[in-house]
Image (cartoon, rainbow, N blue to C red):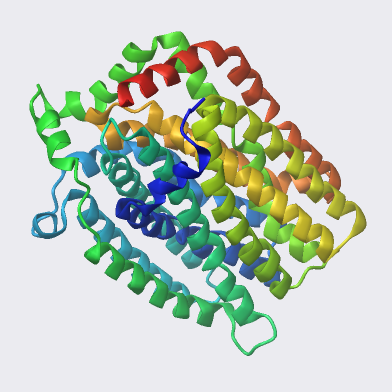
Amino acid sequence: MSATPWFKDFAVYREPRIWVIFGFGMISGFPWVLIGSMLSAWLQEAGVNRANIGLFGIVFIAYSINALWSPLIDRVRLPWLARHLGQRRSWLLVCLLGILAATAGLGWLDVTVQTWWIALLAVVIAFLSATQDIAIDAYRIESFGAHEARLQSAGAAMATAGWWTGYSGLGAIPFFLVDGTHWNWQQAYSLLTLVVVAQIFWVILAPNSTRYSAVTTQLKAGQSWFHHTLVAPIAEFFKRSGWRLALSMLAFIFLFKIGEAFLGRMSIVFYKEIGFTNDDIAIYSKLVTWWVTIVFAILGSLVNLRLGIVRGLLIGGLAMAASNLLFAWIAGVGPNTNLLLAAVVIDGFTGAWSTVAFVAFISLLCNRAFTATQYALLASLGNLGRTLLSSYSGFVVNALDGDWLLFFVLTALMVVPSLLILLALRKPLLRLEAAYQQDSN
């Protein structure tokens, strides 16, 4: 528990580095619009089966395996760009240029006859987005010193708020455009290329992460490239934690977000099948969720400072499971916008709280000598459960004969195994958190 007056916790948000991270969070969240909610709505309106829409989620597996190439972000310096933009921003610029080209390509395709090309461009966007996430996460962690624990927590909150701004705030644009206008989904994709252009300028104008040069020196002062980029990060994590605690923490990371991912993968299909309009989706699922998530991401970081990351994860996980039951209620009564408002507000609150604690938890486990690689490995494991398993969410709904109420009850129960692991590991994790706080003071 912190002895500092609660209102002084807001002082961390005067730090300019926090707001740079907010912008990078937007860059991280925006591709999920292009290959997630927007693509799902386009496919659903084109008459694609919900099982096949769910399978499109396999493209998100790129986020689960990006650790395989994360050493490149730590070690490979891009000619000319790295000299002018730094290691992290140079990689971000290259990825954004590729996303820009792929987004423009989606604006020229017909979903009814060029589905394979759409799938290919979705894979390209997912691969590039997963790559830029490595650089963004490393930039965030390296932007603060080991003694700046409060700024790290605030950075996790702003990364979450930025991600939801990119996904929900900017993600509302295509739904407003397509509903009740002469715009189609291809034209909406073409317009969104302007958003990517704006993100490119943000990366160019942002400062370098201040800690990177020291990390680079440490990485270069060892044995071989293979040892430092592949073997050492994994070995160091298991040696530092002990293999039993390490495996248990990895199991928790894998399982924690599965229920939320199942819900999220099918949410747009559910909204449209149950009878909500694109405007309803834009207002409630996007805009309301956006502001709720930003507010509670910030408040969640402040509460986590008081309660600690482990307690924050436990409370957030329980609340996250309970919020899924509200969607089951909607499934039982039909397209009631008042219930939808309540559901997205509570879901946004619980999702923001749990995500901030989850990001801070993973950051806590990283050694600064291997920031990009270790964070990517841990985050990839969490994404594996979210993306690979949730890709079959459409098959689950079909197996339930379209019983959405039962589907959402099942998603609520999916969080229970991870919370049982967290309770079993509570004491060693609290000791780990206390040691981190002591080193940071």
Nearer to us in this view, 356 or 99: 356
Q: Image quarter for residue 79?
A: bottom left
Q: Is residue 41 left or right of residue 117?
A: right
Q: How many marks?
A: 0
Query: Which residue is depicted at the point 67% across and 62% down?
Result: 285
Q: Residue 145, how many percent across, how many down?
A: 25, 35
Q: Quadrant of the C terminus?
A: top left
Please report the residue visible at 35 percent of the width from the left and 44 percent of the height from the top.
137
Can the viewer see residue 265? yes
Name the residue: 36% across, 37% down. 376
Residue placed farthest to the right in the image? 333
**Residue 291 % position (x, y):** 59, 60
What residue appears at the point 84 percent right and 54 percent down from the top-left corner? Answer: 330
Q: Is 130 or 23 nearer to us in this picture? A: 23
Measured as percent of width and height from the top left, residue 275 is found at: 82, 67
Side of 389 relative to 371 (left or right): right
- Residue 282 picture location, percent across and down: 65, 70
Residue furthest front in the image: 5
Residue nearest the viewer, comparing 165 with 399: 165
The quarter of the displayed image where residue 342 is located: bottom right
Residue 384 appears in the picture as rendered: no
Image: 46 above or below 417: below
Residue 147 quadrant: top left
Furthest residue to the bottom? Answer: 182
